[in-house]
Image (tube, grey):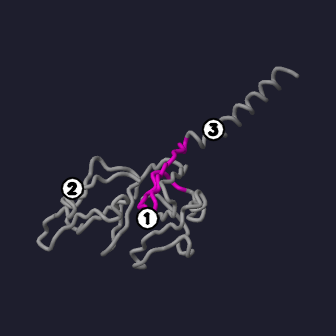
Amino acid sequence: MNGGSIMYKKTILSILIIILLIPNILFAQTTNDITLKPGFNFVSFTNLITLTPTELKALNASIEDVFLYSPSAGSFLSASEGTLSSLSAGKGYIIKSNASSDIKISITGNAITTINPLNLKTGFNLVGFSQAPASLTFVKLMTDNSILKCFYKWSPTAGTFIQVIRDESGFITKIDGVDPTIKAG
């Protein structure tokens, strides 16, 4: 073998290694660890999820169903019923677990680089936060956006919703005496 041939092979090998590494450099993989409590869990994904609802259910046999509220339909779409066919960041989902104790699932995907604005419909909207806003509470969000009438946060421990509402006079009331902080996921 001559020196030119060896150099050619090293160059080709170097190019192949770079090509294999570029996707991992350009699209940083992140893991979204989610702890599911028995019953209903309100979640949002903090990475670009590539799983289908069926694949998400297959992560743990205790995942009974995955739901997404559709404001245009005025009802919930369900993975089990076949009406929910895709998952994405920036949306709120309900995952129902029939486990008797907490279970953990890990979802790997590319890091989120942009967040689309929320398009709220009149009435009920189930939204998810894929990136946490800087120290934002329900009261602060409602104070800054008079169009927002109420917020609910599910408390799996209590088995009920924590509520912050705007009454007919425009006053914001913490029904349960709590002003939850908005968090990602």
Instruction: Using residue 21 as the reference point, say whether residue 87 is left or right of it.
Output: left
Asked if labels 3 and 2 touch by Cβ distance under 8 angstroms, the answer is: no
Instruction: Using residue 156 as the reference point, say whether residue 24 is left or right of it.
Output: right
> Chief secondary structure of the magenta span?
strand
The correct choice, above or below, for 154 with respect to 23 in the image is: below
Label 2: how many Cα within 10 Å (few below 14, some 14–19, many 20+): few
| Residue 37 occupies quadrant | bottom left
Give the amino acid at mark 3. Answer: Leu
The local secondary structure at tag 3 comes to helix
Q: Residue at x 35, y 51 (%)?
A: 183
Q: Residue at x 43, y 57 (%)?
A: 44
Q: From mark 2 to mark 3, how far is it between C-alphas? A: 43 Å
Q: Residue at x 51, y 51 (%)?
A: 104
User: Which numbered dot is residue 21?
Assistant: 3
Label 3: how many Cα within 10 Å (few below 14, some 14–19, many 20+): few
Quadrant location of the N terminus in the rendered image: top right
How far across and down, in percent of the image, does residue 163 sit?
A: 25, 64
How far across and down, in percent of the image, does residue 9 sit?
A: 79, 29
Q: Residue furthest right?
A: 1
How far across and down, in percent of the image, does residue 137 sit?
A: 25, 54
What residue range appears in magenta?
26-49
Q: From mark 2 to mark 1, how far is it between C-alphas? A: 27 Å
Could you say which is closer to the camera, residue 135 or residue 154?
154
Give the amino acid at mark 2. Answer: Lys
Q: From mark 3 to mark 1, how far is it between C-alphas? A: 40 Å
User: Which numbered dot is residue 140?
Assistant: 2
Precedes in sequence: disc 2 or disc 1: 1
Could you say which is closer to the camera, residue 5 or residue 125?
125
Q: Residue furthest top?
A: 3
